[in-house]
Image (cartoon, rainbow, N blue to C red):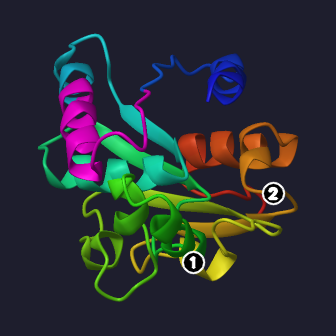
Amino acid sequence: MWPLAWQIGRHGFSTSNFGYPSCWWSIEHHARKLASHLTKLDSNPEIESVYVVAHSMGGIVTRQAVLNSKLEKLQRIVMLGSPNRGSPVAKALGVVLPFCKTLQQLSDRPDSYVMGLDEPEGVEVGIVAAQHDRVIPEPSSHLKCEADHISVFSGHNGLLVRPTAIRFVTNFLKYGKFLTSR
């Protein structure tokens, strides 16, 4: 996320990176920590608005964190390659790596955690999918509540550095849509 945070900073936004060891704790655990981090930002009188940009599982952690919090300043969330409707790769890897609880949680099985997770309310959500994502197929990225959705010529991790994706992220943070000429 550091290269993306640096690029977003170049567009006038102050950034704060939040990291976590994805396989070692559950989504709920990571979400509680993120909710605490976001609550601190939300209560800071020097901050007018809070935006979240999340990649992959980070989008799911963000969804859970937002459900757990009363964030008055949270305006927009951008998800890059997030498995909002689960991931077939997570389902397959969950069999091979049973110690990684998050893989089971991110599975595209109908009874998985992510498939039962509520969608965020009261915040604009933009989703950037990768056209060549072997981890999160484009149809798995959608949410009913999305304000905008766009696909980028990229692979899963390329979304963090692809100039087109970065432009779309900053457009959504500024204007609430990916393409400003619509």
Residue 109 in which image quadrant: bottom left
Q: Secondary structure at mark 2?
A: loop
Q: Relative to 88, is 133 on the left or the right?
A: right
Residue lying at 33% horizontally and 56% vertically, measured from the top left: 101
At x 46%, y 66%, the residue is 94
Residue segment shown in magenta: 19-38
Tag 1: residue type? Pro
- In the figure, residue 123 lies in which quadrant? bottom left
User: What residue is disc 1 on?
Assistant: 88
Q: Nearer the viewer, mark 2 or mark 1?
A: 1
Q: Write down the residue under mark 2.
A: 155
**Does residue 150 show up magenta in the picture?**
no
Helix, strand or loop for the magenta stretch, by majority: helix
Quarter in which the C terminus is drawn: bottom right
* Residue 60 to residue 166: above or below: below
Marks 2/1: CA–CA distance: 16 Å
Depicted 102 relative to depicted 38: above or below: below
Q: Which label number is shown at residue 156?
A: none
Q: Nearer the viewer, residue 68 or 150?
A: 68
How packed mark 1 is, by other alpha carbons closer than 10 Å (few <14, some 14-19, many 20 or more), is many
